[in-house]
């Protein structure tokens, strides 16, 4: 029978912190510099942030001339600041716009480790930090220049403050009582989260508060949150920009962000991302790999120790948020990311203090089922590098063989870990996963030229151009990466629009024409009395649409 309370709080030693942070950097950084700008969200965010620097307008968010009013300003400000530090504007590569996400992900790992150590001892902190660092979703969001890692970092910081307020009702203090223990910290991070991605953070912390009060049949937490000064602090964080954007563009920001980007996702699958309930539970088995191998034990530990305030708080954090996102019509894997630090803490507590919960009975059966799933997912991921290269190029490269080979080593390390659930066996597994990620994200993925159409066009456009600078127009391939890679002036158009650009500047203009638009483009240029000639060709896969793509670069023929 396990005790109802975890071990006494214990801080991580310097050596343990170094272990967690080294694993985090090794797992999350490879690929940041090598992977080209990705479609579509990353390229849109990075380009809009770049345009802030180009235009000097730090209020209105635009992708070229199109208003981008689906999310607040926070992420764009952070990306623009990062790009300024690393060269500014067009001189900063996509990696500079990814730095805020990487730093946020490292912060998520550190805060997760800190919380787990406070709840279950240093061993739990190390385990939880490593689980969070290795999670596939953490790695993806750390390498992507968009909102989600930043949102989760703000949410986690807010939840740390809320946890202190909820589980220490006897602690004296007013609105400001120091550090993350204070209601001021809770409301400050809440405001930052709203400035990053709107009221998503409000949903997470709000359902946690509601579940806590209902479960404990006590409204004391509500009193200790100091709502009036707290809301005033949130307003102080959010209102200056919200007022500025409203004065500049009128109500269109609120109409777009609330009406379409938020409410539009509740009742219907927005942008073809609908899925039935149960989606997030199934996706969890992939995106939380390899830590999902500890999910059964973490769930059993949560139920066994549910009377302990710390564990009860984690349950109130995870379950209501998960249920809400399962009920919402629109579903994407990262929607439940804000709950994963709490799940990682439970995994760390289980590994450090509760592995005997799966020694027999239903616990043993649940762990065996999850172990089989963990091994199957590990095998599937091991095949991905070599499989992707073979699928896209018809050949296999030494780098792909090395990555998949390392993936198979990870499978063996996973099996060894499942045979003996311990931190001692988790560390070799973490090392193997880090090497696998490094080979996959930093070597194999960037080498898949068939995926990076915009990058592949760069040398061909340079050789085809007869002018130092000239207009570039696309017809049929209008992905945001074209604008980020080739510059803000790149025109995303159709066959007729491309023909107009070439006819207007026949000496310097180039047209990038996808083969489905080719006949219409050639007809349009002929109708304008313009003779064109091909100057290069790129074939690949438009992964945003899941379609093969064949692009020809055209220029006006010399007379």
Image: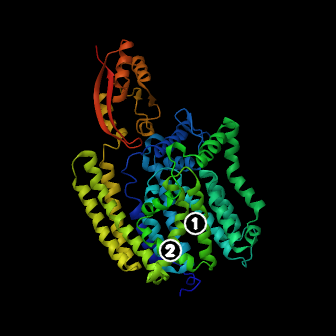
| Label located before the other in sequence (1 or 2) | 2
Where on the picture, by quarter, is residue 508?
top left
The picture places residue 373, in percent across and down from the top left corner, at 38, 67
Q: Identify the secondary structure beneath mark 2.
A: helix
The picture places residue 115, in percent across and down from the top left corner, at 56, 73
The picture places residue 190, in percent across and down from the top left corner, at 65, 59
Label annotation for residue 318? 1
How packed mark 2 is, by other alpha carbons closer than 10 Å (few <14, some 14-19, many 20 or more), is: many
**How many numbered marks appear?**
2
- Residue at 57%, 46% (x, y): give it: 268
Residue on which the image places disc 2: 298
Q: Identify the secondary structure beneath mark 1.
A: helix
| 155 vs 46, nearest the viewer | 155
Calculate the distance from the C-alpha at mark 1 to the C-alpha at mark 2: 12 Å
Can you name the residue that lies furthest to the bottom here? 1
- Residue at 35%, 55% (x, y): give it: 441
């Amino acid at each position: 029978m396990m005790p109802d309370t975890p071990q006494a709080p214990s801080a991580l030693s310097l050596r343990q912190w170094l272990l967690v942070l080294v694993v985090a950097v090794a797992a999350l950084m490879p690929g940041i510099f090598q992977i080209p700008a990705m479609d579509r969200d990353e390229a849109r965010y990075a380009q809009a942030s770049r345009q802030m620097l180009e235009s000097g307008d730090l209020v209105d968010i635009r992708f070229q001339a199109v208003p981008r009013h689906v999310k607040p300003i926070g992420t764009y400000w952070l990306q623009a600041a990062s790009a300024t530090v690393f060269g500014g504007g067009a001189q900063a590569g996509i990696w500079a716009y990814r730095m805020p996400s990487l730093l946020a992900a490292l912060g998520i790992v550190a805060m997760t480790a800190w919380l787990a150590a406070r709840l279950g001892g240093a061993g739990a902190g190390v385990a939880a930090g490593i689980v969070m660092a290795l999670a596939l979703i953490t790695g993806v969001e750390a390498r992507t220049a968009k909102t989600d890692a930043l949102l989760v970092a703000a949410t986690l910081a807010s939840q740390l403050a809320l946890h202190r307020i909820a589980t220490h009702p006897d602690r004296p203090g007013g609105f400001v009582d120091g550090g993350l223990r204070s209601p001021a910290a809770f409301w400050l991070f809440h405001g930052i989260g709203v400035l990053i991605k709107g009221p998503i953070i409000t949903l997470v912390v709000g359902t946690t508060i509601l579940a806590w009060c209902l479960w404990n049949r006590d409204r004391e937490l509500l009193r200790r949150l100091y709502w009036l000064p707290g809301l005033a602090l949130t307003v102080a964080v959010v209102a200056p920009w919200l007022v500025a954007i409203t004065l500049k563009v009128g109500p269109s920001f609120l109409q777009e962000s609330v009406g379409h980007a938020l409410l539009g996702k509740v009742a219907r699958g927005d942008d073809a991302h609908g899925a039935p309930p149960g989606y997030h539970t199934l996706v969890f088995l992939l995106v939380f790999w390899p830590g999902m191998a500890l999910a059964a034990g973490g769930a059993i530990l949560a139920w066994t120790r549910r009377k302990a305030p710390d564990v009860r708080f984690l349950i109130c954090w995870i379950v209501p948020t998960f249920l809400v996102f399962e009920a919402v019509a629109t579903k994407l894997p990262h929607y439940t990311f804000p709950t994963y630090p709490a799940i990682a803490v439970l995994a760390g507590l289980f590994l450090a203090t509760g592995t005997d919960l799966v020694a027999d009975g239903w616990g043993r059966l649940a762990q065996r089922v999850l172990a089989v799933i963990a091994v199957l997912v590990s095998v599937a991921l091991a095949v991905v590098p070599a499989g992707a290269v073979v699928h896209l190029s018809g050949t296999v490269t030494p780098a792909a063989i090395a990555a998949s080979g390392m993936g198979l080593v990870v499978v063996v390390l996973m099996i060894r870990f499942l045979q003996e659930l311990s931190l001692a066996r988790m560390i070799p597994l973490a090392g193997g996963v880090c090497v696998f990620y490094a080979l996959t994200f930093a070597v194999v993925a960037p080498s898949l030229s068939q995926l990076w159409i915009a990058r592949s066009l760069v040398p061909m456009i340079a050789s085809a151009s007869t002018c130092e600078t000239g207009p570039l127009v696309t017809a049929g391939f209008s992905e945001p990466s074209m604008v980020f890679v080739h510059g803000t002036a790149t025109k995303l158009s159709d066959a007729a629009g491309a023909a107009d650009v070439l006819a207007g500047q026949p000496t310097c203009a180039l047209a990038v024409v996808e083969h489905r638009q080719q006949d219409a483009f050639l007809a349009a240029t002929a109708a304008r009395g313009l003779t064109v000639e091909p100057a290069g060709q790129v074939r690949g896969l438009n992964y945003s649409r899941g379609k093969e793509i064949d692009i020809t670069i055209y220029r006006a023929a010399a007379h």
